[in-house]
Amino acid sequence: MRILRFRAFTRPGDRASGNPAGVVLDANPLSDPEMLAIAADLGFSETAFLSSITPDGARVRYFTPRAEIAFCGHATIASGVALAREGAGDTVSFATNAGVVPVAVSPQRATLTAVETSVAPLDGDLLGELLDALRLDPTDLDPLLPPAFIRGGNPHPLVPVAAGVLQRLDHDADAVLRLQDREGWDGTVPVVHRVSADRFASRNPFPRGGIREDPATGSAAAGLGAYLRQGGHVATPAEVTVEQGAETGHPSSIVVSIPSEGRIRVTGTADVL
């Protein structure tokens, strides 16, 4: 077993950029409590545990410091780069609890192909509870991009907001965590603003991952891509960039490729901490 420490969705020349992730290679002998203990000891929002590694892929499980979750985007990017540096082929296949995730890899960059993702409206009492937990008001929402519920790698809501709202976001972490635990939202709670046709800014509260806010969230970026396509908010094929993490001190950049049909792809660079 080897424990590696990476940062994923980095920006060129910025050592502070990217979301930290643990990558544990050759995790076959580890029990679930041991994996949880390692994830808690590392203290990152997620750690990926790779077992049954071959040149073509691995079985991957993801743990936050609190629990196992089905999928994690930034830890997948980090794992792909780690395997490329170990001599893997150009494409690996990760068997995750969310499904099989193909990943194109190199020693600096990886592109994951997200699992099939569905998008549904988010409204009514649940939206009201979420807005209260985020300390937002209905008038803060983007009138052109309605809130939605995303079910892909991890289930989570998506809250598009108007200009100026992200800068003053100050969520109630305890209230968000209660909602995440009650509703089974394993992913972050992405609050996004459309800066331009192909650029989004995002902040992602994540108390369920043991942190206040996640610096870069590949699974949420994939969900955003599915949302934009289903709602006709982009002309496909399209590519959008999600900028995230500046407020945490870890500015990050995520590229989302949205084909006219088929699964969303998410690309990012990664390096060791």
Image (cartoon, rainbow, N blue to C red):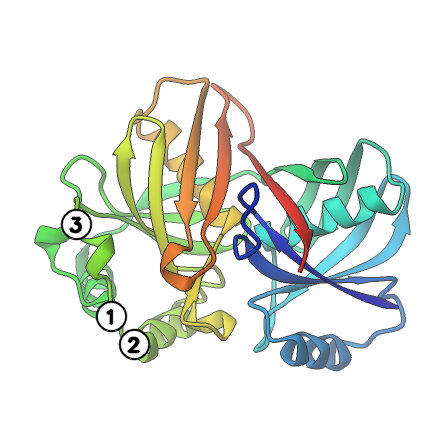
- In this rendered view, identify the residue nearer to me: 266 or 132: 266
Q: What residue did someone put label 3 on?
A: 164
Name the kind of residue labelled 2 in the image: Ala
Question: Which residue is rendered at x = 87% and y = 40% of the image?
Answer: 88
Q: Is residue 123 above or below residue 196?
A: below
> In whole angstroms, how far apart are the C-alphas of marks 2 and 1?
5 Å
Label whose residue precedes the other's in the sequence (2 or 1): 1
Q: What element carries label 3?
A: loop
State the image coordinates of residue 118 (x, y, percent, origin top left). 44, 40
Name the quadrant containing residue 178. Answer: bottom left
Label 1, secondary structure: give it. Answer: helix
Residue ID for mark 1: 133
Amino acid type of the residue that numbered disc 3 sits on in the rendered structure: Gly
SS of the residue under disc 2 = helix
List x then y, in percent, for residue 104. 72, 33
Tell me whether circle 3 and circle 2 mark residues in contact (CB < 8 Å).
no
CB contact under 8 Å: marks 2 and 1 = yes
Cα distance between the residues tagged 3 and 2: 23 Å
